[in-house]
Amino acid sequence: MKNQSTDLSLNLNNIKFSEFQKHWFNTDAIDLREYFTKNISDINNPTKQELKAFNLFLDANKDKNTIVFHGTNAKHDILTEGLKKTNNKNKSFMKSQVGYVYTTLYPSTAQMFGEFASNGENVSVYAIKIPIKHLKSDSNQLESYMNLTNTKVTNTLVNSLVLTHCARIKKDLELCDVRKVWTSCNEELNVA
């Protein structure tokens, strides 16, 4: 099962952003990954000017939508109840702060986080369409980044998105905002 999961993870990264957009009637959404590709010369070592430009881009487009991803245990009834903020009952990681939905720009990363949280059980990956202004920095991932790289960075959304590709959302998500992309118990991707 682990090998299938890894193979599907690679497939998830190769799906074009436009395929995820098709999940919604109104398909307007900004692909933040495309911004990185076109505007940041070295994603592992962005310049201050590139980070400042990205911050200005996010601010100018704060009311526009983007698509981020969340992975969780497949037994959670997300498609009936919506995607709820972390609380003390559903918290999977010791460092996770309550009151947030944790997301990433990449579906394969969402799958990996879902696998960590699900202790070997099946994982579902969800696409979330949300205005950029609702994205908050993921201080947990930034802390891990600083520990791994032995560097100091400020806790900003720009650093969170560029350096860790992660963000948090401080609200429950309605069903109209969430689409299931994949569940590890079946091998087909739901991208159309």
Image (spheres, rainbow, N blue to C red):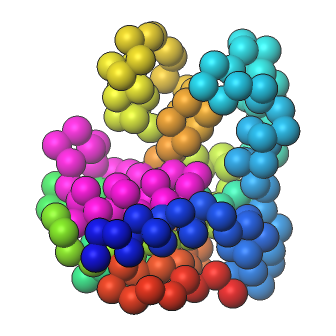
Indicate whether 88 appears above or below 8: above
Along the line of sight, the residue nearer the viewer: 117 or 155? 117
Which quadrant holds residue 29? bottom right
Which region of the structure is painted magenta?
A: 91-118
Locate residue 96 relative to residue 88 in the image: left or right. right
Is 136 located above or below residue 84 in the figure?
above
Q: Quadrant of residue 49?
A: top right
Name the image quarter holding the C terminus.
bottom right
The answer to whether residue 175 is visible is no
Q: Is residue 35 above or below residue 5?
A: above
Looking at the image, which is closer to me, 153 or 3?
3
Residue occupying image coordinates x 28% and y 76%: 1
Residue 131: x %, y % from top left: 68, 56
Q: Please, is residue 58 above or below residue 22 in the view?
A: above
Which residue is found at the position 55% from the left and 83% from the top?
189
Relative side of 171 to 121, left or right: right
Q: Is residue 105 magenta?
A: yes
